[in-house]
Image: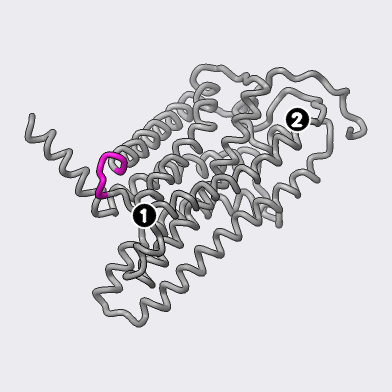
Amino acid sequence: MVPGVNASINVTHFIIGGFDTLSRPIAVGVVILIVYLLAVLANMINIMFIISDKRLHKPMYLLICNLAVIDIMYTSSCSPTMIGVLLAGGNTISYVACLIQMCVFHLGTAMESFILAFMALDRFIAIIYPFQYQSYLTNTRVLVLTFIVWFVAWCFVFYMPATVVPLPHCSSRLKYNFCDFPAVIRTTCVNPEKYFNEVVIFSFFIFFFTFIFICLSYCGILLFVKLSSNNEKRKMGSTLVSHLICVIVYYCPAFVRNIFTRFGVVLTLEERQGLLIGAVLGPCLVNPFVYCLRTKEIKQKFYKIFKKFHTSD
């Protein structure tokens, strides 16, 4: 226990206080609600398109479907809580629900990194070894590798409840907008710096390992593209743009929030919270629209359904 702090208390509920100083909570809540509903709807449409069309039961589309599932899980881990606080005034959450929210949120964070790296591998094999692609990446292998990735992500996440649960709590008030690890660990009676540094090591490993893997994949593709014809270059560029947009939207705020702030970048609590909300909602909204609008097969299926409804009217 840190000297000078109050005695530990029995915490059954947490009070979410991250929005206490917000000047326009209703407006922010409405924006988060709209973005959340759009993100969930768009991702569900992508999932339904891929599941319902056997022609899309291919490795790349299985990964897109998995990304959509992760996006729904990721944004649903915290958005309903923030919407409830801002629009309904329900600023309490039970201890168990808070721990579950913390685990699901950080699982989504890890899985976003892993699945983007997996998709980079898919594009690397598809471009460098187009004739061997179907033998290298079969649906079965993709499903097995996906299961392994989920298992590895769960192993990383398990550290957090295993750390928090045994610790005594000196406060039931969360300084942040929902239950993530930094918010919960700050309510305990211990010095959080040690635990923050341990999480930074995990985050550093996940973010930099996956980011470097993606960069190496792109470097290999660029070297191969130099030897290709202009027509092939255009086709390869088209297949990479979607993935590149998703990588940029996810990694830019993630690096600022998780890595750069540990090396001298100073952010106010409001800036940190805003960046966190954007880091969650941004990718989950952008990803489905990018793959829906830039992937030929999904776009064609969407147009066919839209045309069918239009002609029936």
Quarter of the rendering containing residue 37: top left
Q: Please indicate whether residue 282 sits to the left or right of residue 3 in the image.
A: left
Distance from the alpha carbon under mark 1 to that under mark 2: 39 Å
Write down the region rendered in magenta: 50-55
Instruction: Please tell me which residue is depicted at 33% across the width and 50% down the height of the picture.
Output: 291
Residue at point 65% right, 46% down? 267
**Picture disc at residue 60:** 1
User: What residue sits right under mark 2 in the picture?
Assistant: 165
Does the magenta segment cover residue 54? yes
Q: Is residue 230 above or below residue 308?
A: below
Give how far across and how far down residue 201 sits, in percent: 71, 53
**In the rendering, at what x and y percent does residue 11 appear?**
75, 20
Residue at position x 87%, y 24% in the image: 6
Which of 278/235 is in front? 235
For image coordinates 71% across by 17% down, the residue present is 12
Residue 68 as seen in the image, left or right of residue 163: left
- In this orientation, which residue lies closer to the viewer: 11 or 248? 11
Which quadrant holds the C terminus? top left
Q: Picture quarter containing residue 193?
A: top right
Quadrant in the rendering for residue 163: top right
- Give the residue type that dot 2 points to: Val
**N-terminal label among 1 and 2:** 1
Mark 1 vs mark 2, foreground winner is 1
The label number, if any, that marks residue 262 in the structure image: none
Under mark 1, the amino acid is Met
Where is residue 160? Give x, y as percent. Answer: 70, 38
Q: Position of residue 308 (x, y in %)?
A: 12, 37
